[in-house]
Amino acid sequence: MNRFSYARASAVREALEQRRANGSAVFIAGGTNLVDLLREDVARPATLVDINRLPLKSIEATPGGGLKIGALVTNSALAYDETVAARYPLLAEAILAGASAQIRNVATVGGNLLQRTRCYYFYDAGTACNKREPGTGCPAMDGLNRIHAILGASDQCIAVHPSDLCVALAALDARVHVTGLKGTRALSFAEFHRLPGDTPHIDTNLAEGELITAVELPKEGYAAHHAYVKVRDRASYAFALVSAAVGLELDGDTVAGVRCALGGVAHKPWRDPGAEDSLRGKPLNAATAQDFAGRLLHGARGRSGNAFKIELAARVIVRAFDIAAQRSRGEAAS
Ligand SMILES: Cc1cc2nc3c(=O)[nH]c(=O)nc-3n(C[C@H](O)[C@H](O)[C@H](O)COP(=O)(O)OP(=O)(O)OC[C@H]3O[C@@H](n4cnc5c(N)ncnc54)[C@H](O)[C@@H]3O)c2cc1C
């Protein structure tokens, strides 16, 4: 592990200035991903700026009827918040499908958005990896790629974003509030994470030194008609091979609106608003759900170890629609 110095901030401005003043400094929140990256010699910051004392731990109603969640709210506090559980159960379900209770107790919202891929080669500093060291190559292309991307990959990188929380936030059309020394701004969730292209080492559209301060949810939480379906190699404590977050607005059995984001398939949560529009006004049944899955997965490409994900993703989508539909008719979901 590389040597680093440690600084602690109690105000946002102080944290931003500490980060600027200390060379290759990075923020540390719960540390559940960053400490692993330090241990594996993947991250080599000169300084850690501890942000745990910043006043970013509240969950507040917004004037528009939505919810603003501080970046330091832990995954557990968010999942068990009464308003979230009642109005945004899709979010609570996605969080509780991830990691373990111990990890969720310290992992924060901001850190979850910025967790790095779980690609085996990325964590093995003894191998090439375009994400870790640009220009060195991607052994996953023809190597071990069971957990890798089937959508949006490039010839530089086929890593996936591993978060469950982010899949639900994408489906809910959340916004990410960030602050830098030049001011504050908000990014739509769709523009927050990037596809790898020829810059796979850059995961997001955050500018250098910017701090995530909050995530904002719009008013609509799809509480009545939602599902988060996650398929993984173990029943718990495992990242998604494929997951789907679905929110439906139904008029009887007819789709009035749909949101569907996939996890485990791309470098960012995968959505296609055009495919969602195409389902509006149609009856919700296995055939229309299957048709939607085909559109959302259009262009999917499998490799030696992960081609199974294409069929698996289609089945996960259909299953998620089915659960959401059962809920909409007042039946218990399984
Ligand atoms: C064994 C294990 C299993 C897991 N399983 C799952 C799972 O199934 N599903 C899932 O979604 N996640 C899973 N996780 C990941 C876990 O959810 C993340 O590690 C966690 O959410 C990261 O939050 P943190 O606060 O600990 O971030 P840290 O580790 O402190 O930071 C992560 C990154 O975010 C940056 N950062 C943190 N906060 C901010 C901020 N406010 N502004 C700017 N930058 C910031 C840090 O600089 C760092 O680069 C698992 C983790 C482990 C170790």
Image (spheres, grey):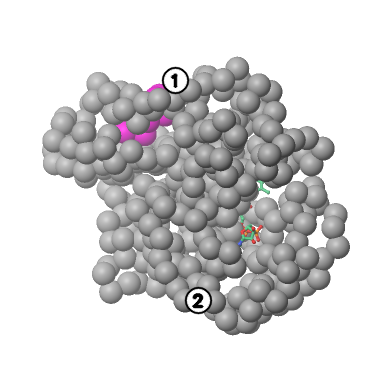
Residue 10: x and y in percent read 63, 82
Q: Give the residue type that dot 2 points to.
A: Lys
Task: Return the disc, 1 or 2, that comes first in the chain's sequence.
Answer: 2
Local secondary structure at mark 1 = helix
Residue 121: x and y in percent read 72, 35
State the image quarter where residue 210 is shown.
bottom right
Q: Which residue is mark 1?
A: 311
Q: Closer to the observer: label 1 or label 2?
A: 2
Ligand 1 located in image quadrant = bottom right
Q: Quarter of the image containing the N terminus?
A: bottom right
Residue 326: x and y in percent read 28, 35
Q: Residues within 10 Å of mark 2 (few under 14, many from 20)?
A: few
Local secondary structure at mark 2 = loop
Q: Residue at x 48, y 61 (%)?
A: 78
Rendered image: mark on residue 182: 2
Which residues, given as a range, are shown in magenta? 314-322
